[in-house]
Image (spheres, rainbow, N blue to C red):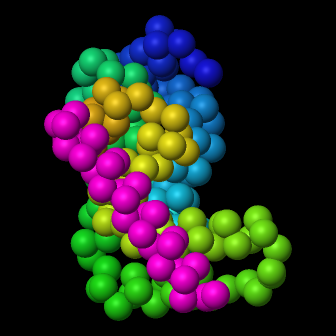
Amino acid sequence: MLSKLEELKLITLCVTLDDHRAFARLVDEYSPGLHGFIYNLTLGDAALTDDIAQETFLKAYSELRSFRGVSRFKTWLYRIAFNEFTDQMRRRTPTDDINSYADKIESGASADRSWQLSHDLAEAMASLSETERSIVLLFYYEDRPLKEIVKITGLPEGTVKSHLSRAKAKMAKTINEYRNDTE
């Protein structure tokens, strides 16, 4: 993991000398985690994940001069990815999402317990709004502190906490309903 000083050096090289190798180093450092975050946001849509990740890095590079260094570069990058994901979801039709989620939930037929848990979790995640899903992923999967989630989403801390609470309740309800329907 890069230190904040190393990040700032690389960013300075990118901005002042248009050093593509310095930006490539940032991409190499943060790409795996960013891809995982986006992949979870898109509920496993690999093509959409790649599109959003590419757009995120393109926007980050083109807007690098606007990076103020108030937060870590990683936080800023995740904010760009979150915004790009939100924009992509706005451009999609609701039926695209429903069909996509239904396909993901219906795929595979293993009776294995871990598959069932994954299936239940996918069903529950699909029931959340984009914002709720993003916050759940950042908090539980990425293990991000609330203050960082606030920076990434741009929402007040109380709103983030409310979304987390509401998301947990929705997920529990969805899992219980799904299990009752399948028994």
Q: Is residue 64 visible?
A: no
Q: Nearer the viewer, residue 112 or 91?
A: 112
Q: Is residue 168 magenta?
A: yes
Left or right placement of residue 112 versus residue 44 in this view: right
Report the residue at 64% width, 87% height from top.
183
Q: Vertical placement of 117 versus 135: above or below? A: below
Find the residue positioned furthest to the top. 5
Question: Is the stretch drawn in magenta largely helix, strand or loop?
Answer: helix
Is residue 148 visible in this depiction of the protein? yes
Q: Quadrant of residue 150?
A: top left
Q: Which of 37 and 123 is in front in this view?
A: 123
Work out which quarter of the rendered image holds the N terminus and state it.
top right
The part of the chain drawn in magenta is 154-183
Q: Is residue 13 above or below residue 119?
A: above
Query: Could you say where residue 126 lies in the image, as x and y percent from the top left?
Result: 45, 72
The spot of residue 84 in percent (x, y) is: 33, 57
Residue 120 drawn at (x, y percent): 59, 71
Most foreground residue, 96 or 88: 96
Name the residue at 42% across, 15% down: 8
Residue 75 vertical placement versus 10 (above, below): below
Residue 54 included in the magenta stretch of the image: no
Note whether 103 is above or below 72 in the view shown: below
Q: In this image, 97 relative to 3: left or right?
A: left
The one nearer the camera, 135 or 17, is 135
Residue, x 70% and y 73% (percent of image)?
116
Q: How many marks?
A: 0
Task: Judge left or right: residue 65 versus residue 42.
Answer: left
Q: Where residue 128 appears, x then y in whole percent? A: 37, 66
Q: Which residue is drawn at 49% across and 55% down?
A: 38
